[in-house]
Image (tube, rainbow, N blue to C red):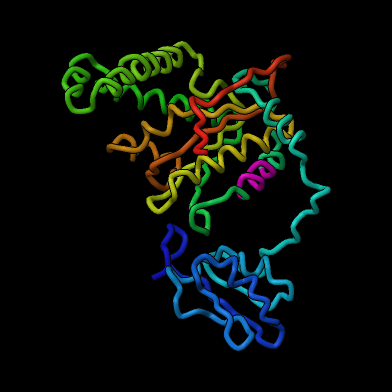
Amino acid sequence: MPIPTSRTTEKGRISIDSLICNGCGLCVEVCKDFSLAIENGKAVESKHSVFGCIACGHCMAVCPRDAISVQGRHLSPADLFPVPQKADAASFEALLALFQRRRSIREFKDKSVERQVIDKVLHAAATAPMGIPPSDVHVLVLESKEQVLQFSKDYCEYLKSLRWMVSGWFLAMMRPFWGKVNTDMFRDFIRPLIAKYTESMDKGENVVMYDAPVGLYFYGSPYTDPADPLIAATYAMTAAESLGLGTCMLGAIHPFIQSGKGARTFREKYRIRFKSREGLFVIMGYPRIKFEKGIHRTFANIDHLS
C-alpha cells in the first residue's frame, strides 16, 4: 500500500534497463523500502517492498550507469541534477559564520524584496529533508508590506474573538484538566500576547509581523510529518541570511488558526489549504539595524551516553 500525501496516493514506478545494469547493488543498498533486489547479477524489483516505492530517488541518484529510473509521486529522471562539488560547498567555518550572523530581525528598511530573491529563498527551502516524499509542505507567500499588514489586521480582529480563552473564569475551570503548566502559559504568555497584538493594532502599530516586506507561512497537511514545515522554514531563514535579508520566525500565529469555525474562515480567506499540526511564519526583509555582536546560545542539556 503506497504511503499517501495530499499530493499523491500512488507509488513510484521503477524501471530498470537490464542491458545497462552491471549489478553493482548500490541501488539495493540505499533503498530502505526494500523495493529492489539483485537477481542473476541484475537489479530487479523486489517482492518484499514495505510500502511500495516512495520515490525518494536515491536509487536513480546513486546508479553509476543511469540504469534505473523512477516515475510518479511528482518525481522523474528530469529532476536529477549533478551533485555540487565539495569545493563549491560551504566549509564548516563558513556555515557557522552564516548561522552566527543571523539574528531575529524585526526592524526593516522601507524597501520591498524582489520577487527573484523570494524565489531563491523558496528554491533553497524546497531542498529541506522531509519525512515522506513528495514534500507535503505548503507555503503562503505574503510578498508586500501591504499584504503583510492586511494579514496582521485580520489576524488581530480574529484574535479579539478568542479573548474568552484567556479569561480568569476559563483558566480556573480548565486548570484541573490541563494542569499548571498550560494555565501558566495561557495566563503569563498568551493573555498578554493577545492584548498586546490587538491593542497595538488598534493604535496603528503592527507588532504581529512588524511591517515586514515579506511573510512566509510554512505549514502541512494532515499527512505531513510535523517536523517538515519547521525544517523548511529553517532552511528559508538560512537562505535569506545568505542573500542579505534579515529574518524572524513567529510562533504565535499558527496555533490560533487551527481549530474552530473562525479559524477555518480565516484560513479560507488566505487560501491556507489545511489545518496543520505544526507550522511557522517567517518574516523577512532588508534589515534597518546592524548588530555588532552575537550572543552565545546553549541547549538545555546534552547527555552523552558513553
Q: In this view, does 83 lie to the left or right of 145?
A: right
Q: Nearer the viewer, residue 7 or 264?
A: 7
276 left or right of 242?
left
Q: Residue drawn 69% across and 22% down? A: 287
Residue at x 35% of width, y 38% of height: 258
Answer whether residue 131 is magenta in the image.
no
The residue shown at (43%, 68%) is 51
Q: Closer to the camera, 297 or 240? A: 297
Along the line of sight, the residue nearer the viewer: 105 or 215: 105
Snapshot quadrant of residue 101: top right
Q: Quadrant of the N terminus?
A: bottom left
Q: How many marks?
A: 0
Q: Which residues are the magenta region? A: 119-126
Classified by dominant secondary structure, the portion drawn in magenta counts as helix
Residue 28: x %, y % from top left: 58, 72
Is residue 96 toward the left or the right of residue 86 in the image? left
Residue 78 seen in render: no
Snapshot quadrant of residue 276? top left
Q: Nearer the viewer, residue 90 or 171?
A: 90
Where does the image place residue 198, in percent across and percent down from the top left?
40, 17
Q: Does the magenta stretch include residue 122?
A: yes
Residue 4, relative to residue 258: is it above or below? below
Note whether 20 is above or below 184 in the view shown.
below
Residue 144 in percent (x, y) is at: 60, 32
Q: Residue at x 43, y 51 (%)?
A: 224
Q: Is residue 20 among what the camera can see?
A: yes
Residue lying at the far right in this picture: please name it: 87
- Residue 70 lies, with reference to residue 90, above or below; the image says below
Give the image location of residue 47, x and y in percent: 46, 80
